[in-house]
Image (tube, rainbow, N blue to C red):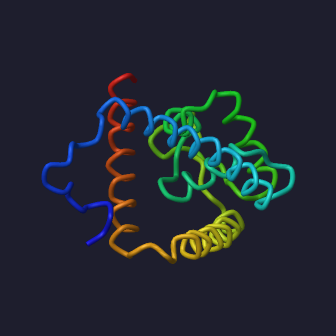
Amino acid sequence: MSAVTDPQPPGTPGPDPHGSFVRLEREIGLLLRRSRAISARLARELHPDLDGAAYGLLALLQDAGPLRASDLVARLGLDKSTVSRQVASLVDLGMVTRAPDPADGRAQVLTTSAEGAARLARIREARRARWEADLSGWPADDVATLGELLARFNRLGEAREAESS
């Protein structure tokens, strides 16, 4: 049985709830700082002229596109000017295409181009291989549990963002 799911031994007090949330805040903060640094590096791997926001934007377009720029702003929680600048850079570099929105011809939808999708796939494969190497000593159940817990945590954040919109 994995350490993540092992029950407390009988008679052992459970974790301190306040201390658990303090640790959670600290660990998520560290994860976010590392994530920003990794996103900046990955964006430079896409193209040296891109900044960190471009990687997340291209990945979202690949996974959920086609999308309007306003959808990217809402989903990524970035400033409209940041998204506009990143979209323009990605279009100029041939990684994103613009097309009229079939639902509203006045608006445009953005889609990952074949070049953008190919570059993104190479980076994602390298990232997946790195995760696999880094976590090779973990039991497969723990890796699956981590993925499941992160998915639940992300859905909670998405629901909260939807409520506030």
Count of numbered labels shown in the rendering: 0
- The one nearer the camera, 44 or 131, is 131
Q: Quadrant of the N terminus?
A: bottom left
The residue that appears at 44% across and 42% down in the rendered structure is 103
Q: Residue 122, how many percent across, how many down?
A: 67, 73
Q: Image quadrant of residue 48?
A: bottom right
Q: Residue 51, how many percent across, how many down?
A: 77, 45
Image-based side of 97 in relation to 132, left or right: right
Name above or below for residue 105 compared with residue 119: above
Q: Quadrant of the C terminus?
A: top left
Image-based side of 99 in relation to 141, left or right: right
Q: Residue 132, how many percent across, how many down?
A: 54, 74
Q: Image quadrant of residue 20?
A: top left
The residue that appears at 58% across and 76% down in the rendered structure is 133
- Residue pushed farthest left? 10
The residue that appears at 62% across and 68% down in the rendered structure is 127
- The one nearer the camera, 81 or 48, is 48
The residue that appears at 63% across and 27% down in the rendered structure is 79
- Residue pushed farthest front? 11
Q: Residue 59, how many percent across, how many down?
A: 58, 55
